[in-house]
Image: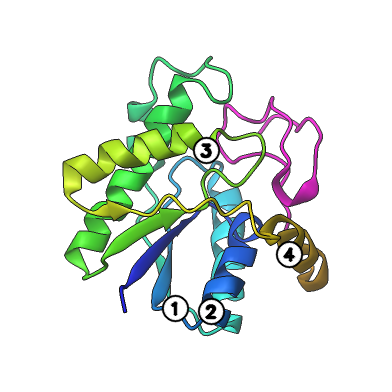
Amino acid sequence: MSKLLLVSCCAPCSCAVIAKLAEEKRNFAVLFYNPNIQPAEEYEKRRQENERFCQERNVPFISLEYDPENWLQAVKGFENEPERGERCSVCFHLRLKRAMEYAKENGFDAVSSVLGVSRYKDMAQVNRAAQKASEETGVFYDETNWRKGGLEQQRQQLVKETGMYAQDYFGCPFSVRTPSSICGKSRLSKSI
């Protein structure tokens, strides 16, 4: 059985996928690498909630370094880009490439992600960034569309049932001005 590394941006976006893979007894682990999430307190809330959800299902949870300075350097010059703009492409590539490097170093056969689960994200944009990272690292990227097969409804149900921490912006300090549907919320966020 192949070993999958699932890149998670947060528990609300990944919970239905984690539950599905766990129920199917898939050989997988969840990877949390999100240097885009700021401030650090918000990052920690999201990391802890993701880890808690995984622990409750006996799913291995891996948290990589929190390096917002590296992320800010990578997106420098793209601060005013809209959601789905070039900043998002750079961000997805940075995170997915780091995940694939980890996967390669630690015996995973493939990487998949929930980075395109939100309806406010462009799944094709995520997949393009992943393919570029895949070519650079030699790690296979599984482009499964985790929005389909009833997973969106299951995601909303799990968030409600578990009382999961539900953030109201994507995490990037530049997204606080953008409506977010993470966890079913859809409102403008306050500035950090």
| Residue in the picture at 57% in, 32% down | 173
Among the two numbered marks 1 and 4 on one chain, the one whose residue lies closer to the N terminus: 1
Q: Which residue does the numbered mark 1 point to in the structure image?
A: 26
Tell me how the rendering is colored. Answer: rainbow
Q: Which residue does the numbered mark 3 point to in the structure image?
A: 123
| Residue in the picture at 63% in, 51% down | 147
Segment tinted magenta in the rendering? 165-192
- Amino acid type of disc 2? Ala
Quadrant of the rendered image containing residue 19: bottom right
Total labels drawn: 4
Say above or below: 10 vs 173.
below
Query: Under tag 1, what secondary structure?
Result: loop
- The answer to whether residue 89 is magenta is no
Q: Is residue 71 visible?
A: no
Marks 4 and 2 sit apart, C-alpha to C-alpha, by: 14 Å
**Mark 2 near mark 1, Cβ–Cβ under 8 Å?**
yes
Marks 3 and 2 sit apart, C-alpha to C-alpha, by: 23 Å
Marks 1 and 3 sit apart, C-alpha to C-alpha, by: 23 Å
- The answer to whether residue 183 is magenta is yes
Percent across and percent down for residue 103 are: 26, 62
Query: Under tag 3, what secondary structure?
Result: helix
- Amino acid type of disc 3? Met
